[in-house]
Image (cartoon, rainbow, N blue to C red):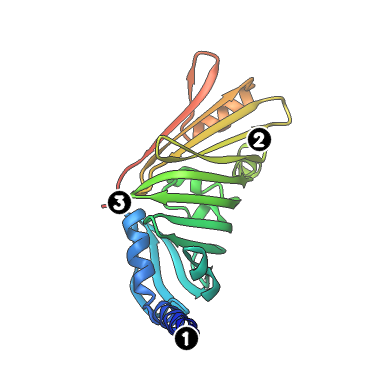
Amino acid sequence: MRWLGHIFLFLLVCLISMALLTPVSFILNQAQSNLPAISAGTAEGSIWDGEISDLHYGKQPVGNVKLKTSWLSVFGGTLESAVSVTDGSVLASGKVGLGLDGSASLKNVKVRGNTADLLSLRQEIRQLGGDFTVQLAHLKVKSGKCLEARGTVWTNILTGFESRYQWKGPEMSGPVSCENGQVLIKLMGTGEEGERITADLQINLNATGRFHAEIENADNKVAQAATVIGFITVGEKLVYEHVVKPAT
């Protein structure tokens, strides 16, 4: 029966060799089937050690992405690669996985950047500057829909009002989840004068979405500052709406 062991070992070596020699464009193609807004310049190397240059998500430039695949992940039924963004306005690192069911997943992803570089924001918002961080413990997508998501987002973009409008808005943070196939981010913060700010970001995987924010208990100083960037008065609240349309 020793020959059975030899055959098994031979097949195992062939399987690993095929996986490691697969071009990195395979991962890019699989990712695009789940995230249709992804585009890139070139994909060079293998999934063992490759690079995707000039990666974009919709109209947002991400940068050059390096991938290194763990051959041990083949045994778990998921092709898992460590990824890092080497340049660009948004810097990120984490792991990307491709499942046998055709899904794609992100794990332990950390993203940091400046809100001025986020092209989906209105210009008046981007001019405030500010930093943001995203920490995704897990995100699973399939066929352009968000299936599972766990993580947190933080930003200090509203503190940028202080130098121009004498109002220092609060830092905001909140969870990441999935809802109706979209990525949902809910942020909240409370200012020094007791103003309460909530914001919901509904993001489709085709790089479109909707942003809705409200300010409660706003005094005249807060209202004057918020009106400059597009908040309007609705009843006793200040409300901001922005729809992100497909890139043209």
Q: Residue at x 42, y 40 (%)?
A: 182
Separation of marks 1 and 3 at Cα, in angstroms: 54 Å
Amino acid type assigned to the residue bearing label 2 in the image: Trp
The answer, for residue 112, to whether it is visible in the render is: no
Percent coordinates x, y for residue 192 in the rendering: 73, 31
Label 2 environment density (alpha carbons within 10 Å; few <14, some 14–19, many ≥20): many
Identify the element where label 3 is drawn: loop
Q: Which residue is mark 1?
A: 6
Amino acid type assigned to the residue bearing label 1 in the image: His
Identify the element where label 1 is drawn: helix
Q: Earlier in the sequence, mark 2 or mark 1?
A: 1
Identify the element where label 2 is drawn: loop
Asked which quadrant contains residue 199, the reply is top right
Who is closer to the viewer here, 193 or 228? 193
Who is closer to the viewer here, 29 or 209? 29
Who is closer to the viewer here, 189 or 25? 25
Q: Is residue 181 above or below residue 192?
A: below
Residue mark closest to the camera, 2 vs 1? 1
Label 3 environment density (alpha carbons within 10 Å; few <14, some 14–19, many ≥20): few
Q: Residue at x 44, y 85 (%)?
A: 10
On residue 234, the disc is: none
The answer, for residue 67, to whether it is visible in the render is: yes
Separation of marks 2 and 3 at Cα, in angstroms: 33 Å
Q: Earlier in the sequence, mark 1 or mark 3?
A: 1
Q: Which residue is mark 2?
A: 167
Asked which quadrant contains residue 168, the reply is top right
Amino acid type assigned to the residue bearing label 3 in the image: Ala
Q: Residue at x 62, y 46 (%)?
A: 154
Residue mark closest to the camera, 1 vs 3? 1
Q: Which residue is mark 3?
A: 247
Who is closer to the viewer here, 25 or 171? 25
